[in-house]
Image (cartoon, rainbow, N blue to C red):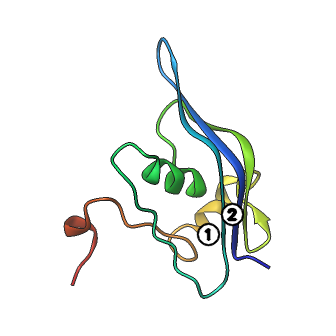
C-alpha cells in the first residue's frame, strides 16, 4: 500500500471576480521509505500541491475534486483536529526558499 496516494486532485482559488484553477487532475504515488521532491518552473503548482495535501490553502482556496490518501486516511475528508495531528509530525514541506527553511 502507498504511504501517499493522490488521485485526480484539483484545487481552485476563488478571487473577487474570477477563479484560478491552481491544480488540475494531479495524481501521484509515494511508497513508504521513498522521498518525493516536487520540481518545476515558477507557477507550475509545486507549492499549491503541497498546500493542498496539508489542506493549508490560501483564502478562497478549496479542493474541488480528488482524493488524498495518507496511510489509508483521506485527508480531504478529515476534520481539522485530526489534520493538526498529522501535519508536521507525519507530513511536512520545505518551502521554495531553502535558505530560510533549512538550518544546516
In the displayed structure, does residue 41 sit left or right of residue 29?
left
In the displayed structure, does residue 69 sit left or right of residue 92?
right
Q: In the structure shown, which secondary structural element does the residue marked by tag 1 occupy?
A: helix
- Residue located beneath label 2 in the image: 82
Can you say whether 39 is above or below 44 in the image? below
In the image, residue 3 lies at what x, y percent?
70, 76
Quadrant where the image shows the N terminus: bottom right
Distance CA(mark 2)–CA(mark 1): 5 Å
> Which residue is depicted at the point 21% across and 65% down?
100
Viewer-nearest residue: 35 or 90 = 35
In the displayed structure, does residue 83 sit left or right of residue 41?
right
> Which residue is depicted at the point 47% across and 47% down?
45
Crowdedness near tag 2: few (<14), some (14–19) or many (≥20) residues, C-alpha within 10 Å: few
Q: In the structure shown, which secondary structural element does the residue marked by tag 2 occupy?
A: helix
- Residue located beneath label 1 in the image: 85
**Residue sitting at the far front:** 41
Badge count: 2
Q: Are marks 2 and 1 in contact (CB under 8 Å)?
A: yes
Q: Quadrant of residue 12?
A: top right
Crowdedness near tag 1: few (<14), some (14–19) or many (≥20) residues, C-alpha within 10 Å: few
In the image, residue 43 lies at what x, y percent?
38, 42
In the image, residue 27 lies at what x, y percent?
67, 56
In the displayed structure, does residue 69 sit left or right of residue 35?
right
Can you say whether 14 is above or below 48 in the image? above
> Which residue is depicted at the point 55% across and 67% down?
87
Amino acid at each position: 500500500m502507498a504511504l501517499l496516494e493522490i488521485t485526480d486532485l484539483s484545487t481552485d482559488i476563488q478571487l473577487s471576480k474570477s477563479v484560478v484553477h491552481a491544480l488540475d487532475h494531479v495524481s501521484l504515488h509515494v511508497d513508504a521509505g521513498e522521498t518525493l521532491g516536487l520540481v518545476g518552473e515558477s507557477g507550475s503548482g509545486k507549492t499549491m500541491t503541497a498546500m493542498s495535501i496539508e489542506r493549508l490553502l490560501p483564502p478562497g482556496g478549496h479542493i474541488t475534486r480528488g482524493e488524498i490518501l495518507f496511510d489509508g486516511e483521506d485527508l480531504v475528508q478529515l476534520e481539522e483536529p485530526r489534520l493538526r495531528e498529522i501535519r508536521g509530525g507525519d507530513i511536512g514541506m520545505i518551502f521554495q526558499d531553502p535558505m530560510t527553511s533549512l538550518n544546516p
